[in-house]
């Protein structure tokens, strides 16, 4: 992460989804309680049902429980899809990979503890992306970068509680295009998005999500005009925490494959 390496000194994270927001606030303000939940919760199909109940009927529950339910479902559902993903290994748990294969409690706890150490330099907000962009424009230092990862154009409504409709994608394009800071964003590589960002530099790439989903379709990196190509690629590699493959290092154009 950029903070660990000293590449940046402050990070601002924004997501409108209340459960994602509850997770981030728990990481930053209730770290040890969250870690205790991670370490003591059994990773079973029955527990997944209980966490789904909390996630979908969460109004009455506290932020820690809701945040943990989002985290738990992200770890035990296929491709990390919280709302609609099936359990890894299926309900009968007969698959090659089982429900706990992405849930290494001690490693996850360490990752959360490490993030929380930097809490004074991590700022979380839960606003609509357009309002967030407006609120930071003019406030950021000159040497700053915005990385936006908006809801997918095609499958957004299946994947996220909050998603974008056509006009939201357009309005978001208008907001981000109007600011002074440098930015990059990633999207699904579809004609509608290519069209929407016709005036910007565009670089297709692919993501390898997991052992099960080897190459999950093409994605698109779009960069503001203020970024040079090499800067845009470096920024993307750093922001997404992805390392260039050996054969891609030194490329002046984006690699065709990115591994996560
Ligand atoms: C492609 S995902 C981003 C995932 C994130 N970059 C990550 O790596 O975990 C899109 C995110 O946008 C959020 N979102 C949806 N509508 C939004 C809005 N109007 N304003 C801000 N965030 C929104 C969703 O909750 C979802 O988490």
Image (cartoon, rainbow, N blue to C red):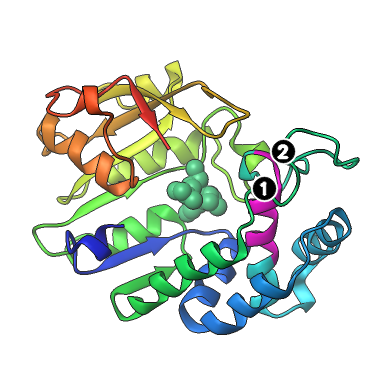
What residue appears at the point 10 percent right and 57 percent down from the top-left corner?
143
Q: What whole-number distance in Å separates the C-alpha atoms at marks 2 and 1?
A: 6 Å
Dot 2 falls on a residue whose secondary structure is loop
Closest to the observer, 106 or 195: 106
Which residue is at the front of the view, 227 or 87?
87
User: Is 225 above or below relative to 127?
Assistant: above
Say left or right for 182 vs 48.
left
Residue 56 screen position, x and y as percent: 78, 60
Range shown magenta: 69-78
Residue 148, percent from left and from top: 36, 46
Q: Residue at x 77, y 60 (%)?
A: 43
Q: Is 244 left, or right, of 212 in this rendering? A: left
Q: Which residue is mark 1?
A: 101
Question: Split into 4 quadrants, where in the image is the C terminus?
Answer: top left
Q: Quadrant of the N terminus?
A: bottom left
Secondary structure of residue under mark 1 = loop
Residue for badge 2 = 97
Q: Residues within 10 Å of mark 2 (few under 14, many from 20)?
A: some
Residue 121's label in the rendered image is none
């Amino acid at each position: 992460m950029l903070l660990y390496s000293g590449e940046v000194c402050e990070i601002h994270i924004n997501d409108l989804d209340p459960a994602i927001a509850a997770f981030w606030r728990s990481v930053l303000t209730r770290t040890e309680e969250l870690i205790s939940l991670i370490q003591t919760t059994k990773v079973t199909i029955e527990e997944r049902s209980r966490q789904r109940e909390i996630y979908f009927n969460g109004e009455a529950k506290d932020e820690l429980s809701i945040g943990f339910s989002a985290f738990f479902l992200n770890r035990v559902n296929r491709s990390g899809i919280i709302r609609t993903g099936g359990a890894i290994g299926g309900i009968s748990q007969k698959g090659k990979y089982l429900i706990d294969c992405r849930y290494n409690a001690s490693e996850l706890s360490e990752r959360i503890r490490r993030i929380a150490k930097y809490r004074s330099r991590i700022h979380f907000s839960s606003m609509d992306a357009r309002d967030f962009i407006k609120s930071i424009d003019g406030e950021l230092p000159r040497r700053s970068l915005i990385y936006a990862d908006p809801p997918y154009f095609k499958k957004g409504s299946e994947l996220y509680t909050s998603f974008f409709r056509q006009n939201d994608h357009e309005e978001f394009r208008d907001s981000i295009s109007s600011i002074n800071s440098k930015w990059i964003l990633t999207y699904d590589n579809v004609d509608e998005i290519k069209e929407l960002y016709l005036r910007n530099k565009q670089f297709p790439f692919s993501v390898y999500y997991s052992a099960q989903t080897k190459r999950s379709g093409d994605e698109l990196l779009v960069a503001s005009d203020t970024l040079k190509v090499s800067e845009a690629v470096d920024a993307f590699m750093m922001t997404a925490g992805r390392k260039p493959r050996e054969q891609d290092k030194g490329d002046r154009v984006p690699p065709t494959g990115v591994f996560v």
